[in-house]
Image: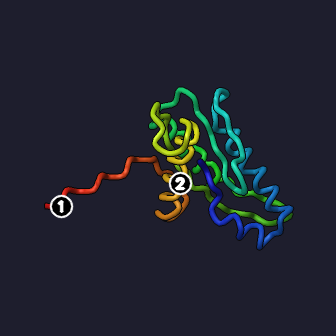
């Protein structure tokens, strides 16, 4: 799951038509990076989901890092303005037993969303992989 960092600031500074062009710019960065077998979709607002079948967690993390770097290195230049921005990405892999949600897809999206939240909390412009929370320690 990918989220554009500070996207509201783009809309507030340049207006929604430029914000729409910035979304298209992000989509182009994603499309230039993913494999033919991958599926990218807008999930809502400035969030996107990328399904990378048959990719391990490490391979998905590498893909996410390539997208993150491409966005950071290629600002949108429009009407004489250069719009720098970054993305934060949460990565999760398929688990046969859903832990969150009713299906494996809902589970995977929820875990990726939790990892994305950690990426945002960790300073943005980063990739985080979902890891299971530590069980509570025994207290004697």
In the displayed orientation, state which residue is furthest to the bottom. 13
**Whole-percent x, y for residue 11 in the image:** 77, 67
Which numbered mark, 1 or 2, is in the foreground of this view? 1
Count of numbered labels shown in the rendering: 2
Q: Is residue 41 above or below residue 5?
A: above
Task: Tell whether 123 sits left or right of 10.
Answer: left
Among the two numbered marks 1 and 2 on one chain, the one whose residue lies closer to the N terminus: 2
Looking at the image, which residue is at 27% across and 56% down?
A: 136
Colouring rule applied to residues = rainbow
Q: Is residue 120 above or below residue 52?
A: below
Looking at the image, which residue is at 70% across and 56% down?
A: 46
Q: Secondary structure at mark 1?
A: loop
Q: Quadrant location of residue 80?
A: bottom right
Q: Which residue is mark 1?
A: 139
Q: Is residue 115 above or below residue 18?
A: above
**Whole-percent x, y for residue 111 in the image:** 50, 47
Q: Residues within 10 Å of mark 2 (few under 14, many from 20)?
A: many
Front one among 50 and 140: 140
Looking at the image, which residue is at 64% across and 35% down?
A: 34
**Whole-percent x, y for residue 3 in the image:** 63, 55
**Whole-percent x, y for residue 109 in the image:** 57, 44
Task: Tell whether 132 sits left or right of 21.
Answer: left
């Amino acid at each position: 799951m990918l989220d554009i960092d500070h996207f509201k600031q783009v809309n507030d500074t340049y207006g929604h038509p430029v914000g729409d062009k910035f979304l298209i710019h992000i989509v182009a960065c994603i499309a230039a990076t993913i494999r033919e077998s991958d599926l990218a979709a807008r999930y809502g607002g400035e969030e996107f989901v990328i399904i990378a079948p048959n990719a391990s967690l490490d391979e998905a993390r590498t893909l996410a890092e390539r997208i993150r770097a491409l966005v950071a290195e290629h600002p949108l230049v429009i009407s004489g303005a250069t719009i720098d921005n970054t993305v934060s990405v949460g990565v999760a892999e398929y688990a046969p037993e859903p832990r969150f949600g009713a299906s494996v897809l809902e589970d995977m999206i929820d875990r990726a969303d939790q990892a994305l939240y950690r990426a945002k909390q960790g300073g943005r412009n980063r990739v985080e992989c979902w890891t299971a929370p530590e069980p509570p320690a025994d207290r004697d």
